[in-house]
Image (cartoon, rainbow, N blue to C red):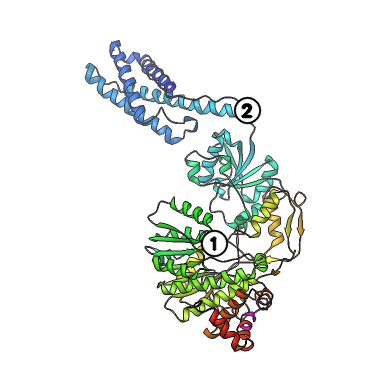
Amino acid sequence: MKKHIKWKPLSFIILDSISVTFSVFVCYYILEPYFAGFPRSVLVFSSLLLLASHHIFASIFDLYHRAWEYASVNELMLVVKSVTSSVVITAFVVPLATNTPFFFRLYLLTWMMHIMLIGGTRLMTRVVSRNQSKGIEKEPTLIVGAGDGGALLMRQMREKNSMNLEPVVAVDDDEKKQGMFIHGVKVGGTIDDIETLVTKFRIKKIIIAIPTLPKFRLEQIYTMTKNLNVQVLKMPNIEDIMSGTLEVNNLKKVDVEDLLGREPVELDIETIRNEIEGETILVTGAGGSIGSEITRQVSRFNPSRIILLGHGENSIYQIHQELSRLNTDTEFIPVIADIQDKHRMREILATYKPHVVYHAAAHKHVPMMEYNPLEAVKNNIFGTKNTAEAAVLAGVKKFVMISTDKAVNPPNVMGATKRVAEMVIQNMNVKSDTDFIAVRFGNVLGSRGSVIPLFKSQIERGGPVTVTDPRMTRYFMTIPEASRLVLQASTLAIGGEVLVLDMGEPVKIVDLATKLIRLSGFNERDIKIEFSGMRPGEKLYEELLGPSEIHPNQIYEKIYRGKVRAVDEETLTAIYYFLYHFIFTNEKSIIDMVIHIPIYSIMFMGLVWTQLVPKESKARIKLKLTGVFS
């Protein structure tokens, strides 16, 4: 590879000195017939003064320390300002100092030639740099978008040899831009023409340069290019392009989250701000996928402090480090604690007295909880109970629990425990001044333990990608969208509700796997899809509401209020004692049996306690558990 010339400040100082002196004498000899008897000494004085003033103003406008290989109109204007200033000074001083007439034509011609020579030496650096890059093999690239972002991107790609990308054609839906050339790149059609242009120009990469490109257009591009062996990338932050720090590894792959994500809901920012700004907010499970994103979203509304509570020290450390780098007055306090520890939770909430608690801590992995049902019960039910009771004692204004669509007709341990947790907070709402609500939604894209990271790792290993059943469907939502809607939902609740987020249309898992394979640059011949059969506790499809829970009206865009059945205090207490008994006695077979009875499993637990457990056993168990529920 050829070495690039480095244009040092000394090089420009020498070139400028030659240019200035040359321009003065050339202009004088061109106009000599008009200046009969003009003293040569004045000419020498003029050239020296112009040279000195030029170097002064060139330093002021920093003409000697710029990357002229990437010069634009802004840099050209600095040249004009510097030259104009030096010529004006010279034109003002020379007549006064030498008692000679003011020769307007001489100074005007000097100004023009001065700009041509000074600007020309800078332009030469761009030409040399461009010629040096011609020998480098670059991948032909199509740019989607010929607006400001696309223009900046094309210019950077042309000038930055390290990217090894050559913009050969652009597309834009604006009819006025058709046929235009932007930095030497022709706008050759609209998004609908991408397939034809990819074939015509043998495109290897497509870069989306429209940050607000609608999801349906992105899906259309994916559909057109999925069989063309072309990689689709997204432009990074426009700040990276403007700062000149753009590199090929800054370009982001169009991922499945981009295709499945939806147009963002416009939040009621002021209402959310009124609930959060200046307050203390506590987030349990703050190191997890949802919990960490909730803390990011909450931090935008300037709370006085956010308590980052979690059981895993590494994840809490990471989110604390990330948030601490933000330019904000919010204090971020990491707290390591287990929500199963009732006394520790009461101590924490009594110390910090949060205004709002977002309860995201839970065991959520369905197959894992089938193997560890007692842990699901202890964490999801009694952990929620401990946190909710601590919130009441601390005078928390609002308690928002993150629930799941798996709580609807649950055939698995995880879903059943989350349904009981919903009942716990509904019951707590009745007997306290704290507003308790649950927000229920489906799978989030990219969360730990979800299919997306699993599929990606399988693709990286060369396959196969394992799908449980070709008929299986799931609801999906991006983590940021879910977290934003949780904040919005919390402002709409009046207490005791289970709010449900609209997840859109269900997605077939096999289709999701196929998209991931193609977005990774492969096809189904390269990476096979195998069907492994359903795992313990899984369903073919999931529901956000049961038949009896559906409420006809949404209370906000993509937010519904579910008509979820609550349980009375006596039944819930019976459920507590029943579950605690089998936790301590570790009678796993019995708890498995009752927790797998669909819909009626919760009531069945209460029935077993009230009707089937002998009075002597009840008294013995209650004595054993004295203080547990106090």
> Dot 2, how many residues are within 10 Å of its Cα: few (below 14), some (14-19), or many (20+)?
few
Amino acid at circle 1: Ile
Does any portion of residue 63 appear in the rendered image?
yes
> Which residue is tagged 2?
135
Which residue is denoted by mark 1 in the rendering? Answer: 290
The percent coordinates of residue 411 (x first, y second) are 67, 74
- Confirm whether the magenta stretch covers residue 377: no
Q: In this view, does 275 lie above or below 323?
A: below
| Residue 334 picture location, percent across and down | 45, 58
Q: Does the magenta stretch include residue 599?
A: yes
Looking at the image, which residue is at 61% across and 37% down? 166
Amino acid type, residue under disc 2 in the picture: Gly
- Based on the displayed image, in which of its 4 quarters is residue 21 positioned? top left
Dot 1 falls on a residue whose secondary structure is helix
Tally of numbered tags: 2
Q: What range of the chain is rendered magenta?
A: 594-604
200 lies left or right of 257: right
Could one spot residue 265 in this view of the protein?
Answer: no
> Measured from the top left, where is residue 444 in percent x and y?
59, 62
User: Which is nearer the eye, 32 or 624?
Assistant: 624
Which residue is located at x 64 percent, y 82 percent?
A: 600
